[in-house]
Amino acid sequence: MQESDRKLISVLVLSAAAIAVALYALQNAARIVFAPTRSSVETGIVAANVPAQGAEGATKGPVTVADHLRIPWAVLDAGDGALLVTERPGTLRKIASDGSSTAYAIEGVQAVGEGGLLGAAWGPPDVESKFLYLYMTVRKGPKLVDRVVRYRWTDAGPVFDRIILDDIPAYQYHDGGTVAFGPDAMLYVTTGDAGDDANAQDRNSLAGKILRLTPDGGIPADNPFGNATWSYGHRNPQGIAWDDRGRLWATEHGRSGASTGYDELNLIVKGGNYGWPVIQGDQTKEGMIAPVANSGPTETWAPSGLAWYRGKLFFAGLRGESLYEAAPTEDGKVAGLRADFRGEFGRLRAVAVIGGRMYLTTSNTDGRGKSKDGDDRIIGVDPALFFAGGR
C-alpha cells in the first residue's frame, strides 16, 4: 500500500471517529442535566450509626445500613442512633445502632398493589410526648380504604391510640401515602386519586389531595374549603417537604400506561388546583397551577420521598432509579435538576436526613424492580457529597 493511501485511510478513520463523538454528544445533550454521580456501595455494613464525615474511617460514599428488608417505605429517627422503618407488608422495624432489629406487626394492614403500611411521622412537634402517626391500607367491610392511625410509643413498641383519618379511597394503584408535620404544627397527608381521576378535582373527596389536619384529626379553622383539603388536582403525590422559607413542596407521579412521563415537582399553595387530569406537563389553564418542574413526555421519574437539606430538595425516583437534586430559587422556580446514583441501587423510595446523615430506601422487591442480593436495603450517604468540593 502506498504512503498516500495510508494517509487517506487515517484521515477517513479519524473523521469517522469525530462524527461518532459528535453524534453521541447530540444524542445525550438532553441528559447532561441528569448526569449521575457514581459511587460504589460498601456492602455488608449493617449498623445505623454510620460514621459522619471527618470521623476516622468515614466515607462520603453510600454504605448499606440495613439489608434484607421487605419493601421499606418510610424512615424515621428512633433515637440513640436507631432508625424506624415501615415495611409495606405491615411491619414496623426498629434498627438499633448495633445492627440488631426488632419487628412489630401492625394489625390489619392490607398490602394490596401499591397499598400497605406506608408513611410515618412523629408528632406533634410542639409537645414533649410524641405520638407515631402511620398511613396504612386496611379492609373495611367489602372494600379497601386508606387511613391514618396514631400510636403511643412504649418500651414494648407501638400501642394503638386512635384513628386520625378514615375512609380515604384506596385502590391497587395511586394510594399516596405520606404523613408529615409542617412548621405550623399541623399534620399533612398526601393521597392518590385511587385509580379514579375524577376524585382529584372533587374538593370534597379525600382522594387526589394534600390534606391538612390538626394533630387529633380535626379540621383547622384556616383550611381553604372548610374540610381537610389543602390542595387538590393531584394524581399520586408521595413526597412533601418544607424549605427554609416555610414553602411546601411535593413530588407527584404523572401519567402511566402506554404513555408515561410528566412526573412533577410542585410548589404547593393553600387552596391550589394542580390540574390533574385536565392539564399535565407545561400545559396551563386558568385556575390551575402547572408544576415547577416536570420530567417531560419521554423521561419517567416516578418520584417518591422528598427531603430538604441546605438549600436543596432531594427526591427519590422509583422508575427513574435515581436520587434527584433540585435547587429552588427565591421566586419559586428551580435552577436545574441533577440525577445521582442513576441505576446504581435500583428503585429508590424514601429520602430522609437524620442527624446530618441522609438515608435512602430501595424498593426492588415490590414486584416492579430487579431484586439484588440483600435487597431491600437502607443506604446511608454523607450529604456533603452533593455540595461543592464533596463530589
Image: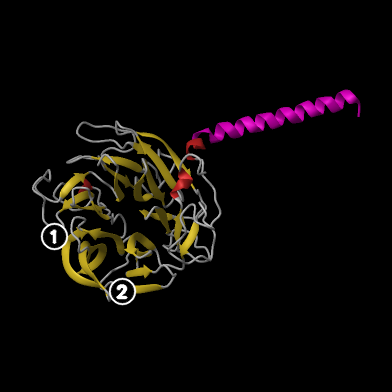
Q: Which mark is residue 105?
A: 2
Give the SS element for disc 2.
Answer: strand
Instruction: Return the residue at label 1.
Output: 216
352 to the left or right of 133: right
Q: Position of residue 130 (x, y in %)?
A: 22, 63
Quarter of the image for the N terminus: give it.
top right
Give the residue at the far bottom of this rendering. 156
Residue 196 in view in this figure: yes
| Depth check, front residue: 141 or 167 | 167
Residue 87 in view in this figure: no
Relative to residue 263, is residue 354 depicted above or below?
below
Give the residue at the far top of this rendering. 4
| Badge 1 amino acid | Asp
Which of the two discs, 2 and 1, labels the residue nearer the N terminus?
Answer: 2
Relative to residue 87, is residue 289 depicted above or below?
above
Q: Position of residue 161 (x, y in %)?
A: 17, 69
Q: Quadrant of residue 275?
A: top left
199 to the left or right of 236: left
Asked if residue 20 is among those painted magenta in the image, a careful observer would answer yes
| Depth check, front residue: 242 or 251 | 242
Which region is colored magenta? 1-30
Sort mark 2 into few (<14), some (14-19) or many (20+) by Cα contacts within 10 Å: some
131 to the left or right of 313: left
| Badge 2 amino acid | Ala
Q: Residue at x 74, y 29 (%)?
A: 14
Q: Which mark is residue 31?
A: none
Asked if residue 187 is among those painted magenta in the image, a careful observer would answer no
Q: Position of residue 9 (x, y in %)?
A: 81, 28
Q: Residue at x 46, y 68 (%)?
A: 68
| Dominant secondary structure of the residues highlighted in magenta in the image | helix
